[in-house]
Image: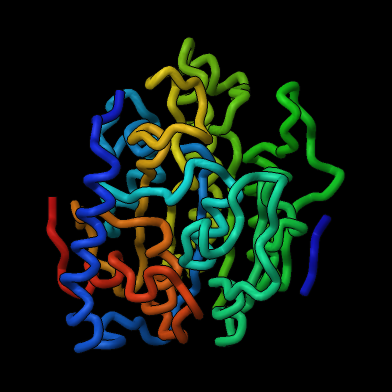
Amino acid sequence: MVRTGGARRLNVRARAWCSFALLLALVPLVSACPGAVEISPPPNVLLVTIDTLRADHVGVYGYDAAHTPHLDSLAARGVLFENAMASVPITLPSHASLMTGQHPPRHGVRHNGLHRLSDESNTLAEVLADGGYHTGAVVGAVVLAGETGLWQGFAHYDDAGSRLATDESGFLERPAIELSNRALALLRELTEPFFLWVHYYDPHEDWRAPAEWSKRFVGRPYDAEIAYTDAQLGRVLRALESDGRLGRTLVVLTSDHGESLGEHGDRTHSYGLHETTLHVPLVLAGPGIPAGKRVVDVVSLVDLAPTLLTLTGMKPLADASLRASAASRTLRAGGRSG
């Protein structure tokens, strides 16, 4: 339905305290220079979330066996955050955190299918829409259907409704090629400045990449799905480049969580708070963003919405857990490069 209107072992607790200390240390800097990195005129924003993508299975994060040329190229012309952490290893709660700048205890969404984002929540899309952005979303799984509350602020919310395909595991999803097709169609409708969110679900189990990719990654079905999704991401980026809008678009790529792949006695995700399920890629590229920079500071996905609102010159999110975001402060201060 289209709606209108192996990994490094790190101590997660230690990293959380490190992130908290970093936030406290940099608050005075934010207060002293508001809007220091605001981009003018406000850029378009393309937010891409690739479900279940752990950072250490991406080429630019050091995985030599990966085939992620478009993601790697995006990082080369922007900023890569080496230590970005999801707030929770579950799809809906993590996306709710990303869109609200709040952790699950604040926004109240703790699991897929059991909770929805309150209509009173203030989201990234709502703030951008109020600021004059034309907004649209294309999501690849029923766990992010409009009924979850994530539609708030989107004039177009394409969740495909009953046309979603059912796989053996019971998940409702549609493949990356369809997501890119729908995203390209929506891009033709959105006028500038636009905010488009595209959510790819393919790296989520079950892994059944098209034959072209499965044959290239025999015995590595997870990597095959990632490579396939990267290729479909490339179609969207090429379309923006061909019509001249890529240079005016802030592209953000991340994931909602990783995947255990058998480590820590866990085959998938949801219940283990380990590096494998929380460490996700985070790349920002576009106008006003330095090229080829790697930041080693620990940041969280709850930092992302406040950062994007800073970069676009919009008002801050109401009640964001990390309103003065670590990622925004890192960009302003120059960060610590790896």
Quarter-of-image position of residue 10: top left
Reply above or below: 326 against 288.
Answer: above
Estimate the x, y position of residue 120 in percent, counting from the top left.
Answer: 66, 75
Colour scheme used in the picture?
rainbow
Number of numbered labels in the structure image: 0
- In terms of depth relative to the viewer, which is nearer, 233 or 120? 120
Quarter-of-image position of residue 335: bottom left
Estimate the x, y position of residue 185 in percent, counting from the top left.
Answer: 70, 59
Reply above or below: 323 against 273.
Answer: below
Q: Is residue 205 visible?
A: yes
Quarter holding the N terminus? bottom right
- In terms of depth relative to the viewer, which is nearer, 151 or 198? 151
Quarter-of-image position of residue 321: bottom left
Reply above or below: 220 against 1.
Answer: above
Estimate the x, y position of residue 134 in percent, counting from the top left.
Answer: 63, 77
Residue extending furthest front?
A: 105
Residue extending furthest top?
A: 219
Q: Is residue 216 left or right of residue 6?
A: right
Picture residue at 45% right of the left edge, 72% below the top = 320
Residue extending furthest right?
A: 162
Picture residue at 62% right of the left edge, 22% below the top = 208
Estimate the x, y position of residue 114 in percent, counting from the top left.
Answer: 71, 47
- In terms of depth relative to the viewer, which is nearer, 196 or 11? 11
Reply above or below: 30 against 96.
Answer: below
Picture residue at 35% right of the left edge, 60% below the top = 284
Picture residue at 63% right of the left edge, 64% below the top = 187
Q: Is residue 292 left or right of residue 274?
A: left
Q: Is residue 242 visible?
A: no
Q: Is residue 154 left or right of residue 196?
A: right
